Image (cartoon, rainbow, N blue to C red):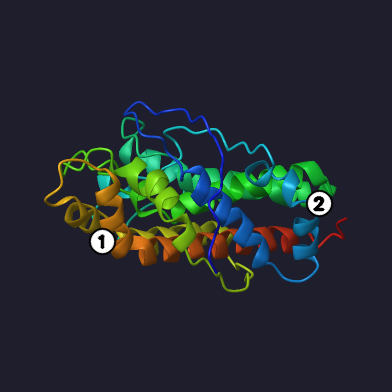
């Protein structure tokens, strides 16, 4: 399924390093829209009926507040596959102290999920839609390989500006070529633990993204149209797979939150 180009504008806050820690507006809108398609009947009807009330999909879209916490540079702590990584924020701080800044993405997901469960229990339509949108943006981050590495912006490999190129400019350049078709949402037995399985399954793509970016730049003086044409032939499938997984994971978190809230009837 091909995604049309989305004409949207967004202002993002930059973290201390100058990196905008989010997928760009095109990628995020695609993830949110396709997550709705992956929901089971009934829940899907609710989201479809109110999709334009979700911030990312509104006629004048807005996007979640950005910031340096919306990442998790796990390789700053230990090498892949992160076997001894603490799964609670308290344990992480106890082991490494507060001085190590790697982001709070796993725990931001946990916190957003809990708020969504509460919103479902209250049958608060506005809160459900806004928190679903926020949760999808966080989950999508967990499916972005660059959000999980200390070399996110290519600053250690002379690929400066990599995060913006891959997460924002590249999705815009190939919007009409993306094929995002997620599987049906599934119930997550352990929504907190699932975050860390996402960490390992996403991180394996870090080297691929960096290599494809480096190859596409070879022989070119700048990251211009020719670079993006080259990158499109090499990495569109990888990007489509990452956004598909993000849509699938987002839908599964929504569905699990609704189920944990005892499946309230929604209008």
Q: Decide: few, some or many residues near mark 2? Use Cα within 10 Å; few <14, some 14-19, many ≥20.
A: some
Looking at the rendered image, the quarter that the C terminus falls into is bottom right
Q: Most extreme residue toward the left, as rendered?
A: 219
Q: Decide: few, some or many residues near mark 1? Use Cα within 10 Å; few <14, some 14-19, many ≥20.
A: some
- Determine the residue positioned at 67% across, 61% down: 36
Residue 235 at x, y = what percent?
A: 32, 62
Q: Are marks 1 and 2 in contact (CB under 8 Å)?
A: no
Query: Quick one: SS at disc 2?
Result: helix
Q: Is residue 15 above or below residue 177?
A: above
- Determine the residue positioned at 80% across, 58% down: 46
- Determine the residue positioned at 35% across, 54% down: 145
Relative to 213, is 202 on the left or the right? right
Q: CA distance from mark 1 to mark 2?
A: 42 Å
Looking at the rendered image, the quarter that the N terminus falls into is bottom right
* Residue 200 in sight from this viewpoint: no
- Determine the residue positioned at 51% across, 29% down: 11
Residue 133 at x, y = what percent?
A: 64, 47
Which image quadrant is residue 7 in? top right
| Residue ID for mark 1 | 208
| Residue ID for mark 2 | 121
Which mark is on residue 55? none
Q: Give the number of the mark in front: 1 or 2.
A: 1
Which image quadrant is residue 200 in? bottom left
* Residue 257 in sight from this viewpoint: yes
Most foreground residue, 150 or 99: 150
Residue 167 at x, y = what percent?
A: 40, 47
Specify which label sits upstream in the sequence, 1 or 2: 2
Q: Is residue 100 above or below residue 194?
A: above
Most foreground residue, 230 or 45: 230
């Amino acid at each position: 399924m091909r995604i049309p180009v989305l004409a949207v504008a967004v202002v993002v806050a930059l973290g201390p390093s100058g990196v905008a820690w989010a997928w760009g507006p095109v990628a995020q809108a695609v993830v949110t829209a396709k997550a709705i398609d992956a929901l089971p009947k009934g829940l899907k009807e609710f989201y479809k009926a109110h999709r334009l009330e979700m911030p990312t999909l509104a006629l004048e879209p807005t996007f979640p507040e950005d910031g340096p916490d919306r990442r998790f540079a796990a390789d700053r702590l230990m090498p892949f596959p992160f076997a001894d990584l603490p799964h609670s924020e308290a344990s992480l701080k106890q082991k490494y102290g507060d001085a190590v800044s790697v982001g709070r993405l796993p725990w931001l997901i946990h916190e957003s999920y809990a708020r969504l469960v509460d919103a479902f229990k209250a049958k608060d339509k506005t809160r459900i839609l806004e928190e679903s949108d926020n949760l999808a943006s966080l989950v999508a981050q967990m499916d972005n390989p660059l959000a999980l590495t200390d070399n996110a912006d290519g600053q250690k490999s002379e690929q400066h500006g990599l995060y913006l190129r891959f997460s924002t400019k590249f999705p815009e350049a190939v919007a009409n070529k993306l094929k995002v078709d997620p599987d049906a949402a599934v119930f997550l037995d352990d929504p907190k633990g699932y975050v860390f399985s996402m960490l390992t399954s996403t991180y394996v793509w870090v080297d691929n993204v960096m290599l494809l970016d480096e190859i596409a730049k070879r022989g070119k003086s700048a990251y211009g149209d020719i670079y993006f044409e080259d990158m499109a032939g090499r990495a569109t499938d990888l990007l489509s797979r990452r956004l598909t997984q993000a849509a699938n994971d987002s839908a599964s978190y929504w569905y699990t939150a609704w189920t944990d809230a005892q499946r309230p009837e929604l209008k």
